[in-house]
Amino acid sequence: MINSAFTKEIKLFLGIPTIGPTFKEIIVSSFTALLATLCIIYISKDVLSYFNVHANIYILIPIAATSVLVFVVPHGALSQPWQVIAGNLISAFIGVTCYQYLGQDLATAAALSVSISIMAMSLLRCVHPPGGATALGAVLGGDTIHQLGYSYLLIPTLLNCLIIISVAIAFNYPFHWRRYPSHLYYKYNLTTTISPGARTNEVTVEDFMKAVTEHGSFIDMTDEGWNEIFEKAKQHAEYDNVHPDTIELGQRYSNGKIGKEWEIREVLAIDRKKTIKYLVLAGEHTNLSGSCSVNAFTAWSKFKVTKNDIGIWSRLH
């Protein structure tokens, strides 16, 4: 018992997951990454040759890390097209700028390039870990990269990013469980929903973790992280299930549902006939407007919500 507990603690401390990708997923990830890397190398050379552009650097070294994210974790938040393109481009710009103005002190320029890149990517919601290496490469990449100046943003950075995004879309598409970007997967892989009245069993941790494994592609989360999310979801579900006493103009309300039935509406107008006009802010029908009686809206809504600075909806107590 002691050895078992000790072994479990060591695994948790080291972050060794109990849920891993299937052998099929490993083979597909590795093979598609191989093809993608070959495409980046050869297509970049051919494109530059076609436009008669002579560049000593035609492949971005951090693109290898991007390839790991895109082909191993295709549905990860850090792997999506906006993160890949914007994250690398912004970091490249910052890296070049730091070298241009602080190149006489490479240590300071390098440290600032990574730090400012992290800040910029966070503010613009395009955090992409390889972006830090892209910025660092602009500072410490040597004379060949330094001579590129701001053209480093176009060749190889933008060129490589566009190629890997295109290849990722094409090569992942035949595998329905890992289509890229993630929007294509969730759009065409509809999950069967169970209405609240038809549920007879409580969701357990085992059920939750099984659902995680059935997703198919790798999801970047530790076992402890999954358990925390599950327990917090249960805690929030235990709040009193009551409807608001009054519906207020300009406020946002959630119906408190889960899955595809979840929706958030903003009250745009309440007329004298007790009719509410609303706009759907989140859910299956985002950006659609509608109207209903105040009583119907009250019966639909569970509580008021607000969106925090990072775009997460939370309940107003």
Image (cartoon, rainbow, N blue to C red):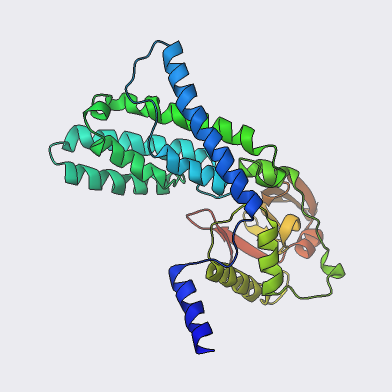
Above or below residue 316? Residue 33 is above
Which of the two residues, 244 or 283, is positioned nearer the viewer here?
283
Q: Answer left or right for 256 relative to 1.
A: right
Q: Position of residue 31 (x, y in %)?
A: 58, 40
Where's residue 22, x and y in %? 64, 56
Asked whether the viewer can see residue 268, the reply is no
Q: Quadrant of the C terminus?
A: bottom right
Residue depicted at 47% across the width and 82% down the height: 6
Q: Is residue 22 left or right of residue 300?
A: left
Instruction: Check the image and report above or below for 313 versus 169.
Output: below
Regarding residue 21, the answer to whether it shows in the image is yes
Query: Which residue is situated farthest in the left direction here?
Result: 104
Q: Residue at x 33, y 20 (%)?
A: 55
- Residue 173, given in percent of the width and then of the height, sits at 67, 37
Which residue is depicted at the point 70% across and 58% down? Answer: 214
Judge from the rendering whether residue 154 lies leftward or rightward of residue 242; answer left or right: left
Give coordinates of residue 191: x percent, y percent: 77, 54
Q: Quadrant of the N terminus?
A: bottom right
The count of marks equals: 0
The residue that appears at 24% across and 38% down in the rendered structure is 140
Please state which of residues 126 and 54 is positioned toward the viewer in this rendering. 54
